Amino acid sequence: MAKNNQLDHHGDPDGSRGSYPNETMRLVIERASCRSFAPKQIEPEVMDLVLRAGAAAASGGNLQPFSIIRTEKRQTAERLAELCGGQPWIAEAAANLLFCIDYHRLERWAKLETAPFTATCSFRHFWISFQDTVIAAQNICTAADAMGLGSVYIGTVLECLREVRTIFELPAGVFPVVLLSMGYPKVRPEPRKKLGLGVIVHSEKYNEIEDHALVAAYDKKYPQSKFEITEDRLATIEVVCRRTYGEAFARECIARIKSQGYISAAQNYFGLHYRADDLPQGNEEFLEIMEEFGFGWLRKYQPDVNAIR
Ligand SMILES: Cc1cc2nc3c(=O)[nH]c(=O)nc-3n(C[C@H](O)[C@H](O)[C@H](O)COP(=O)(O)O)c2cc1C
């Protein structure tokens, strides 16, 4: 029975190893996040190559509306580890890369060329730029793997956006998307089990999977993920269920946990780890933060026709 330590929600290792027509396919299919780094610097020429893979990524209109803030200072890494919810691998990593949407640079370019610019006010721009930024990050992950490095995304920068903005002196129009901790792995991480193609890939139209097949697919992905029932966990799940769907659902969930004799992976994910009652809280604050960072697409667009730029 799994103790609910902080790695449990990452799922089970996939012991199987495949054979592939080439090394690139092995690299992308048998990749895994790395959370244990050797105390070894990344050689500048290696880092340069890996970063070039990010610059080479596809981007909408080839605009490349992102910046990557690289930090190799121990003190900064330690501060980030603390701010991102106590994740020690951030402090251990030889380098941390902060991927940001960057409209500051694009706007300066437009201004210098006397061109109109409204990307910060456009949801369409934001949506595409978010994808551009993540695609560049993933190119970097793959390149890092190819150079014998390891990396892990850190999504919890979202919880400390204002602090991160101050640390890296981000100007208005620069919005952090994700952090990537990178270094030489202490041990090559084991790939995690993933859902099969039959669940993820739909042919010609969206095919609704049968209930039993859906549950079986997740059971296959998380075969070990039966979490021990403790009073604390039960109490938390009950509160989460009550706040989310009310008293009757809370009773139903607790009765089911007791009758099955464990907390299931889904109950652990949404009842304890990514708490269903908690995660939608603070949406308004994120909207405020977006505005503070110079992103105005949440409001009705007002052309700035009298602006002298
Ligand atoms: C957007 C995003 C945010 C993530 N944030 C974190 C994080 O804050 N801390 C962490 O340890 N792993 C983080 N991860 C890594 C995932 O936990 C990991 O990809 C997942 O458990 C699957 O494992 P694998 O990458 O080894 O296949 C993140 C991954 C993504 C894509």
Image: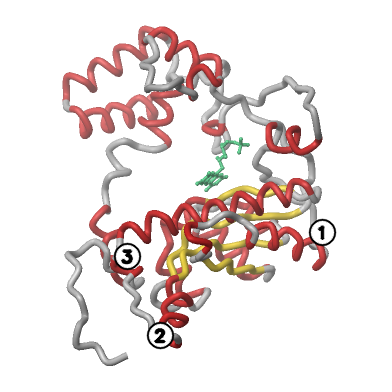
Q: Picture coordinates of residue 60 (x, y %)?
A: 48, 57
Secondary-structure class at tag 1: loop
Element carrying mark 3 = helix
Mark 2 sits on what residue? 111
Q: Depth-wise, is mark 1 or mark 3 nearer the camera? A: 3
Q: Which quadrant of the view contains residue 196? A: top right
Q: What residue type is labelled 1?
A: Lys
Q: Residues within 10 Å of mark 1 (few under 14, many from 20)?
A: few
First along the sequence among labels 1 and 3 = 1
Residue 151 relative to residue 135: left or right: right
- The one nearer the camera, 89 or 235, is 89
Q: Residue at x 43, y 10 (%)?
A: 261
Quadrant of the frame with the C terminus: bottom left
What distance separates the C-alpha of mark 2 from that of mark 1?
Answer: 43 Å
Label 2 SS: helix
Quadrant of the drawing holding the N terminus = top right
Write down the residue under mark 3: 290
The amino acid sitting under disc 2 is Lys
Q: Mark 1 points at which residue?
A: 40
